[in-house]
């Protein structure tokens, strides 16, 4: 198997059974605007360290899948304009051609699992896009989570998506879905969608127990922990709905396809809400990182579970 470059502090933490949380880099390179993205990347790592958790931001650097970026690598991912967006299918190409790229939820989950990291924090999952019947646009995040044993803390799926269809796909694909202190599926920029959840957890130890039982049952699928953004941090509903309609119409006019769609929609939101969606997006990620830290800590403290 291809060798991963694992940062020393991440390797030592994993070997000694201390908590580690993986962070993705597409969110940094393609989801948040420069230069704020680099500040946020550093802040997320600091939030974890403050809680005694080792951060492992993941990307491909000059062809090497890298688990735990140093300051130079993080600056390259955040600062340059030509960082590729790498989903799972892009990983071998980036490796073979020695490219540098940011990893999505799908490829970050895969690389985290390969490195032995069990907990991962992001903003919102990809999913089934609105108008799927015409575009067949469904994020590779979903199929990858179906076969990757990682716990992903997110604020549900992005509200730019068809949330109901995405929930159906998660069910079909056998991805375990837990509401974090909520019975209602969260909507990324909004704290709630109209969809109720089957399962709710209220403590990190419960999530760690679900993970242990998933392992005991031989499941190889992900556990998604859906953590709503605080009500005071969510985006105003009317602003959200108006900008979303405009952004979707503009994406259709431009004929956007494939991996360009999601970054375009997020960027349009950040511009057309005069930064309000950016503040919500950052609040979402902070909130998820904090919960992921607690889950990773509970997981590392469980007797008899594999380290990581
Ligand atoms: N969460 C955010 N911002 C982002 C993403 C998640 O707050 O930019 C990224 C993740 O990397 C996710 C990707 O995997 O968006 C989904 O892209 P697509 O729809 O092309 O699969
Ligand atoms: Mn897509």
Image (cartoon, rainbow, N blue to C red):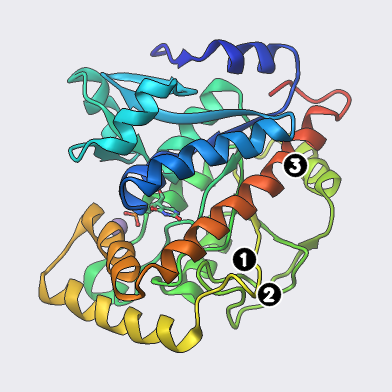
Q: Nearer the viewer, residue 175 or 46?
A: 46
Q: Quadrant of the N terminus?
A: top left
Residue 48: image location, x then y, percent? 65, 35
Is the C-beta separation of discs 3 and 1 under 8 Å? Answer: no
Displayed-image quarter of ligand 2? bottom left
Is the C-beta separation of discs 1 and 2 under 8 Å? Answer: no
At numbered mark 3, what does the secondary structure look like: helix, strand or loop?
helix
- Dividing the picture into quadrants, the one containing residue 15 is top right
Q: Which mark is residue 184?
A: 2
Is the C-beta separation of discs 2 and 3 under 8 Å? Answer: no
Residue in the image at 64% along x and 66% along y: 228
Report the mark closest to the observer, 1 or 2.
Answer: 1
Residue 109: image location, x then y, percent? 50, 37
Q: Which residue sits furthest right?
A: 303
Residue in the image at 48% along x and 63% along y: 279
The relative height of residue 168 versus residue 62 in the rendered view (above or below) is: below
Sort mark 1 into few (<14), some (14-19) or many (20+) by Cα contacts within 10 Å. Answer: many
Sort mark 3 into few (<14), some (14-19) or many (20+) by Cα contacts within 10 Å. Answer: many
Q: Which residue is mark 3?
A: 295
Q: Which residue is mark 1?
A: 229
Q: Earlier in the sequence, mark 2 or mark 3?
A: 2
- Dividing the picture into quadrants, the one containing residue 260 is bottom left
Sort mark 2 into few (<14), some (14-19) or many (20+) by Cα contacts within 10 Å. Answer: many
Q: Earlier in the sequence, mark 1 or mark 2?
A: 2
At numbered mark 2, what does the secondary structure look like: helix, strand or loop?
loop
The relative height of residue 170 versus residue 76 in the rendered view (above or below) is: below
Q: Nearer the viewer, residue 19 or 148?
A: 19
Left of 60 or right of it: where is 44? right
Q: CA distance from mark 2 to mark 3?
A: 20 Å
Left of 255 or right of it: where is 88? right
Left of 64 or right of it: where is 232? right
Q: CA distance from mark 1 to mark 2?
A: 12 Å
């Amino acid at each position: 198997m291809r060798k991963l470059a694992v940062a020393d502090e991440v390797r030592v933490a994993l070997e000694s059974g201390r908590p580690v949380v993986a962070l993705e880099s597409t969110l940094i390179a393609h989801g948040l605007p420069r230069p704020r993205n680099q500040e946020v990347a550093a802040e997320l790592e600091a939030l974890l360290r403050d809680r005694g958790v080792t951060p492992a931001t993941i990307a491909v650097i000059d062809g090497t899948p890298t688990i735990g970026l140093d300051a130079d690598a993080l600056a390259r991912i955040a600062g340059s304009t030509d960082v590729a967006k790498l989903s799972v299918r892009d990983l071998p190409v980036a490796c073979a051609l020695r490219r540098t790229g940011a990893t999505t939820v799908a490829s970050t989950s895969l690389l985290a699992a390969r490195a032995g990291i069990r907990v991962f924090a992001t903003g919102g999952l990809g999913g089934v896009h609105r108008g799927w019947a015409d575009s067949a646009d469904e994020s590779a995040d979903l199929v990858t989570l179906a076969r990757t044993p990682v716990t992903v803390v997110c604020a549900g799926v992005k509200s730019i998506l068809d949330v109901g269809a995405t929930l159906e796909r998660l069910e079909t694909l056998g991805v375990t879905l837990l509401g974090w202190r909520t019975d209602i599926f969260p909507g990324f920029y909004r704290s709630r969608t109209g969809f109720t959840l089957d399962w709710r957890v209220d403590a990190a130890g419960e999530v760690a127990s679900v993970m242990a039982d998933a392992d005991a049952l031989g499941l190889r699928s992900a556990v998604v922990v859906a953590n709503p953004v605080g009500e005071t941090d969510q985006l105003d509903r009317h602003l959200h709905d108006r900008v979303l309609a405009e952004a979707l119409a503009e994406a259709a006019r431009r004929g956007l396809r494939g991996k360009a769609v999601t970054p375009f929609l997020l960027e349009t939101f950040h511009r057309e809400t005069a930064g309000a969606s950016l503040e919500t997006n950052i609040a979402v990620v902070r909130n998820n990182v904090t919960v992921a830290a607690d889950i990773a800590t509970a997981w590392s403290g469980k007797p008899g579970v594999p380290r990581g």
